[in-house]
Image: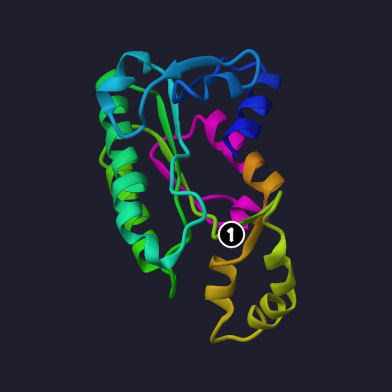
Amino acid sequence: MGRALIERLLARGHRVRALARASSTARLPPGTEAVTGDALDAGSYGHAVQKGDVFVHLVGVSKPAPWKGRAFRAVDLASVEAATRNAAAAGVSRFVYLSVAQPAPVMRAYVAARAAGEALVRALTVPSTILRPWYVLGPRHWWPILLLPIYWLLRRLPQTRDAATRLGLVTHKQMLSALVRAIESDGPGVTTVAVPEIRGELTAK
C-alpha cells in the first residue's frame, strides 16, 4: 500500500518524505525523499517531520491474525504513539490514519489497538482523517472475493445489514483513492471514513 500510494502522490505533484529502515530505502519509488529511522522510535525521525506537513500513518503488523495481540500493541499502537508525538511537536497541518472497521466480532486485539490509535489521533486537535477498511482486496489478497455472495445476502437481512456494510470488502484501488482524498482534504476537525465512503458510495462524516 505504501509504495503504491507514494507513486500516486508523486504523479499528482506532491513532495513525499517516507520513513524507512536503512535496508529498505532503496526500494522507495524514485523521487521520494527517504527518511531513515524506526517507526517505533519517535526520536529517530522527529527531525524530518515539519510544520504544515500532512502526516500519513500506514504502519502495522503484516498479515493480522487473532493470535498477534502482543504484536498489535508493540507495533500498531506503539508506532502511532510515536507518530502522534512527532506530529504534535512539529505542528502538522493534517494527520491521516489507516485504522480498521469497528466494532467487529473478530480480531478483538487488533481492533482494540487501532481504536486506541484513533484516540491518540483525536487528541492531536489538528484536522485528521481516520480510514476504517476491513479487508482490502488486492495483489495476493483476492481470496475473500469468494465471500461476495454471502455479503450480498447479509446486506439484505435487517439483522445483519449494518455489520455486513461496516465490515465489507474494498479494493486496493478504492483504498488508494480514499487515502489520496484524505491527504488532499482541507476539511476541519476529525473525519471518519468507513467502508461505504472508501468505496465512494457515500460522503464521509
Residue density around tag 1, few if under 14, some if 14–19, many if 20 or more, within 10 Å: some
Q: Position of residue 108 (x, y in %)?
A: 37, 68
Q: Residue at the location (64% across, 78% down)?
A: 155
Q: Which residue is mark 1?
A: 135
Location of residue 86 by image quarter: top left
* Boundaries of the magenta span: 178-205
Q: Residue at the location (25% across, 41% down)?
A: 123
Q: Is residue 175 left or right of residue 37?
A: right
Can the viewer see residue 110 in this picture? yes
Between 110 and 164, the one nearer to me in the picture: 110
Does 180 appear above or below 17? below
Q: Position of residue 129 (x, y in %)?
A: 45, 41
Q: Residue at the location (61% across, 66% down)?
A: 168
Q: Position of residue 130 (x, y in %)?
A: 45, 46
Location of residue 70 by image quarter: bottom left
Instruction: Identify the element where label 1 is drawn.
Output: strand
Between 123 and 39, the one nearer to me in the picture: 39
Q: Quadrant of the N terminus?
A: top right
Is residue 194 part of the magenta span, yes or no?
Answer: yes
Q: How is the image coloured?
A: rainbow
Can the viewer see residue 111 in this picture? no
Does 137 appear above or below 96? below
Q: Residue furthest front?
A: 23
Q: Position of residue 196 (x, y in %)?
A: 61, 59
Between 114 and 140, the one nearer to me in the picture: 140
How many numbered marks have been drawn onto this rendered protein structure? Answer: 1
Q: Residue at the location (58% across, 85% down)?
A: 158
Q: Amino acid at mark 1?
A: Tyr
Location of residue 144 by image quarter: bottom right
Is residue 40 part of the magenta span, yes or no?
Answer: no
Between 183 and 31, the one nearer to me in the picture: 31
